[in-house]
Amino acid sequence: MIVIMKVNAPQKAIDRVQQEIEKLSYTPHLVEGATRTVIGVLGKKPLRGMQHLQSLPEVSDVLEISTPYKLASREWQPKDTIVNVGPARIGGDTVTIIAGPCSIESYEQIKIVGEAVKASGGHLLRGGAFKPRTSPYAFQGLGVEGLKMISQVGKEVGLPTVVEVTDTDVLEVTAEYTDMLQIGTRNMQNFTLLKAAARTKMPILLKRGMSATIKETILAAEYILNEGNKQVVLCERGIRTFVDHTRNTLDVSAIPAFHRLSHLPVIVDPSHAAGKRHKVLPLALAGVAAGAQGVMVEVHPNPEVALSDGPQQLVPEDFQDLVERVRIVAKAVGKGIE
Amino acid sequence: MIVIMKVNAPQKAIDRVQQEIEKLSYTPHLVEGATRTVIGVLGKKPLRGMQHLQSLPEVSDVLEISTPYKLASREWQPKDTIVNVGPARIGGDTVTIIAGPCSIESYEQIKIVGEAVKASGGHLLRGGAFKPRTSPYAFQGLGVEGLKMISQVGKEVGLPTVVEVTDTDVLEVTAEYTDMLQIGTRNMQNFTLLKAAARTKMPILLKRGMSATIKETILAAEYILNEGNKQVVLCERGIRTFVDHTRNTLDVSAIPAFHRLSHLPVIVDPSHAAGKRHKVLPLALAGVAAGAQGVMVEVHPNPEVALSDGPQQLVPEDFQDLVERVRIVAKAVGKGIE
Amino acid sequence: MIVIMKVNAPQKAIDRVQQEIEKLSYTPHLVEGATRTVIGVLGKKPLRGMQHLQSLPEVSDVLEISTPYKLASREWQPKDTIVNVGPARIGGDTVTIIAGPCSIESYEQIKIVGEAVKASGGHLLRGGAFKPRTSPYAFQGLGVEGLKMISQVGKEVGLPTVVEVTDTDVLEVTAEYTDMLQIGTRNMQNFTLLKAAARTKMPILLKRGMSATIKETILAAEYILNEGNKQVVLCERGIRTFVDHTRNTLDVSAIPAFHRLSHLPVIVDPSHAAGKRHKVLPLALAGVAAGAQGVMVEVHPNPEVALSDGPQQLVPEDFQDLVERVRIVAKAVGKGIE
Amino acid sequence: MIVIMKVNAPQKAIDRVQQEIEKLSYTPHLVEGATRTVIGVLGKKPLRGMQHLQSLPEVSDVLEISTPYKLASREWQPKDTIVNVGPARIGGDTVTIIAGPCSIESYEQIKIVGEAVKASGGHLLRGGAFKPRTSPYAFQGLGVEGLKMISQVGKEVGLPTVVEVTDTDVLEVTAEYTDMLQIGTRNMQNFTLLKAAARTKMPILLKRGMSATIKETILAAEYILNEGNKQVVLCERGIRTFVDHTRNTLDVSAIPAFHRLSHLPVIVDPSHAAGKRHKVLPLALAGVAAGAQGVMVEVHPNPEVALSDGPQQLVPEDFQDLVERVRIVAKAVGKGIE
């Protein structure tokens, strides 16, 4: 932590800051400039109770300098983490394809999609069973019935599955029927859910919150790692900005930013950011070009009758085309699809 | 819903859109302009399955025109809702003062604050027992012990209490020890929690999500109203923007916007938006001047040793000053503090 | 400037940073923590050529700590600046009222408004002669004819005038016919215009850019002050955020933030932020409650036939009501309207 | 334009809206739903004076449906525009490389860069002569001397040049010494400059404003096209969001959005968005993968002594690597580099 005094702050004010630091059993380090003094506080243990320094007289600003996460940080683990979900692996030099419908709507629907995902070379089957919807009057998902359907289809077509767990009440049943748990964007800071999901020891797909910074996202992952579960995949899915031509703004720069700060794998979800079908492909390719280690897209056999998010779901043919193009771009940036 | 065709769209494409609308048993209404056709679809029941129209050929855009909420809408209930919490009332022409520490830290702490809030003319005592914290290493609250402390102090000083309920696991115990439930900004779209909290039939303080639109916030309230609980207070607490001089940007324009669209009371929380003490007072007054029916602020006997959010908490003397000034501004805009 | 090394950075990397700092003739100050070293660089003269330090090996981050502006800073001039425009004064403990139509449309129109502004106790008459419009097909203003009209009406009703200068081509003529120059939000970083306008020695009303930070806004003012012109008024007029219920989000927290960092007066323009008439009054009052030293609003005798921004302009009666309410709120926060 | 009445609006209010529309000589088209009426107004000529309809009683909302631009719209010109700058072409199925230093600092500097750009297969040489800088104390560019240097080097190495024109005062001289004019992000809505630059009949590189929507950007281009100059290239360079891990957020989704709405070529500038060198390559590749028809990057022989934007400029070796990778990704998405 660095305390920056105002220009020409009197000695008395500087002394006061030093005393407050010492009161908390830390050591202040003075750097005296021509017109301004700054005071460093560095310690092995986390600095507690320091926030109030910014309220002291003649203090201009207080800057945090230590990284607030440790287990998720590349400073402490330089090597990429690889997350395994059954036969699928996420991380390192490969691009993993995760696909499936927004909502599971029937056995037939998820079966058609599951076969298409498998046939196109996808690695995981996704599908929503419990749907968090902005409106209470929108379709809320098939629930446990949906879980059973995707579980059965996953086995039949030979793909591990990933399903969003929306709250602790449905954690146990979701964990029973699926291979990987997804934490959705609205739950990224539902810390109770993060900890409970972590304790299942299952791999977790953590979506970045709609207005979460990189640091907040890594700290959410840290909640999971701190429970002893290292199988976490980060997912960039678009952020909320002033932009109105798309549902969310896919922040591709988050991908190299995550890679620099953390060893966890990073995938990209272009469907939610796009909102419309014709943007899904360009955003998927952009994500891979920027270094994403996976792509998660929504596929539906018949988007015009989909019960949720119809306009952004791909038909199986478009999905196959997407996988082929992702493969080429992945290769272009030195990655492969297994 | 309005479907806007592209300029000079061929008749065939227009026919196709009409057929799709009729397939779903709605009636299309054509408006033919000089260069462009638009097609209206209006119905009593909600329009389902229409989203895919935007994927049809020659369709330029599809606009929703119906209000997606009903119970919370002023179109359906013009009269202001008044929410009662014990002797305190929120809504209408009064300004209600809610105050207390960010976190409950000890009986002594909450007692000092409770007495100060009562003495200054505050109406509800707030305090955090379960703290959702960005970092897993930060203080997470006293839990049930904290609930017991605020409950006891509330009775001793004669103030109803409001405490945040962070997840369904702690809903029952929180409901047992407090008079009003708060849903925090990170949980505004935790729909399971919204519904479960609603079913307690207790009054609910619903904070706007950090990146939630007005419409999404009212829809979150609609989840509660839809469970038969009409005792909902909306709270503007600052949104996430590019601005870096403050923690969140208090969106005062949300206050008249909520009032125009909904009959629910609206209060303002300047502490979280401000992040720093010297901005709390100006933002509180701004909120009241813009029409807020209440102010919720953080008060701590000794902010420099606070276990959370120290820099934004007021000492009791500053709080008393704030209440007095709020009283004057409230009067200036035709409101009163009871 | 503070250079933060990575955790456990080797001595060699630390030495390298020190050498680079010394190469530029500055003195590095080392602060060695338990796991991390930080290096301070403080100097009287501005630090040039330091940005590249962040590219050196094992450097985690480089933080600027010095204030990049000086003339506009309260650190260097604690006392409030008062800007005088003829008999009107802006700054200190008063609230100045600036009003007039978005666009000057005719002598009759500006005359009616000028008389209404004067009658209601307003201090300056505003009006647009050159209109920067998003679309090339929108009304672009009456130009020099408009300038002559507002100049004449200003004299007739006894109010100094303020008109936006949109580029250097029209600076001379605008300066000839008006008492104060306005720099619009789109021109806040038109540095050529800032410098040229400054050299007229006229008082300048500088609007914050739609996505400008507080620091960038003060730096834009610094361009003017650096030309020897100290008569600058800052204007908060709303920023661009994800919010869609209003045209721009009035950032009331900018008002105390500007006051803390700069001695320049700060006024608020609620009309552009509101976009719609019913929000102008609440936002005006919110601005004053938050400490604004003036309010600028759009007034039109007949908004439904206005050539620009009709929906946000007040009729004279509403304006008179606004002035009365501003007066009450100003008094409530310890200010007056002269 | 569509006027949406409130639920159960009385006939009288509906009549009033119709009368107002007829008063302006347009024809209202009524669509009566079960609970709500909407009124369409469609015409060949632009709808003027309609904005005030939203202030009428019982009107819920007024929606614009017509595209406000025409010359730049793909609705009116389906075929891609190709912009030619000397031997270089921008648009269609090729990816054009534009590179050079942020600021021209000396003949030697721009010569080294020009040779590197040519050697690596770049198509245009860029360089700043007049630098718009946030701080008045930062390096402001070499001015006309810089123009002469880049002009000479362009001829020597055989590359057409592009230089930012910062205001009308320097337009003539900039046009004299360069082959393409750049309008910077801060000037995107400097309409005087747009029109004046357009009248030179030179090709124009128009950067999207930092907080400009797609529609506003296309309308800025429309200003140029409306002067009879069709040689406009749009450039996505990052927008301002809450994100703090990068200088601006590169909005890759803008690329397909621009392509859908307009026939103008779209390129991407990853340097300004990145702010730091290690993000330039991933963002450049992401832009090309999303469909950009060109990449503009900053190259400097010795970034650590650069007078502006050092941390984001590439050294020639990194630039060569970037061109090679862009070539591969361009090919992967069906494009080529000539």
Image (spheres, coloured by chain):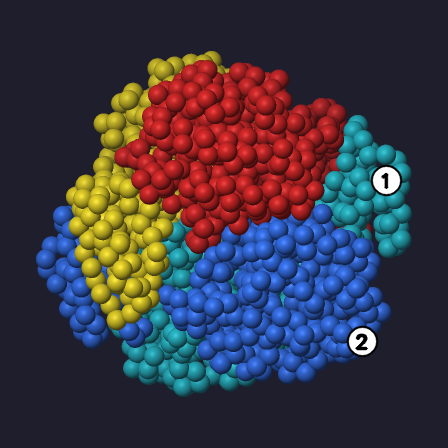
Chain colours: A red, B yellow, C cyan, D blue
Q: Crowding near pointer 1: few (<14 within 10 Å), some, many (20+)?
A: some
Rendered-image quadrant of the C terminus of chain C: bottom left
User: Can residue B335 be seen by looking at this rendering?
Assistant: no
Residue position marked by numbered label 1 in the rendering: C13
The one of C281 and D88 positioned closer to us in this rendering: D88
Q: Residue at x 43, y 47 (%)?
A: A277
**Label 2: chain?**
D
Q: Amino acid at mark 2?
A: Glu
User: Can residue D257 be seen by looking at this rendering?
Assistant: yes
Q: Position of residue A59 (x, y in %)?
A: 66, 42
Q: Position of residue D9 (x, y in %)?
A: 14, 53
Q: Position of residue D72 (x, y in %)?
A: 46, 70
Q: Residue at x 77, y 66 (%)?
A: D118
Q: Amino acid at mark 1?
A: Ala
Q: Position of residue A253 (x, y in %)?
A: 61, 46
Q: Which mark is residue D156?
A: 2
The one of A312 and B146 positioned closer to us in this rendering: A312
Q: Secondary structure at mark 2?
A: helix
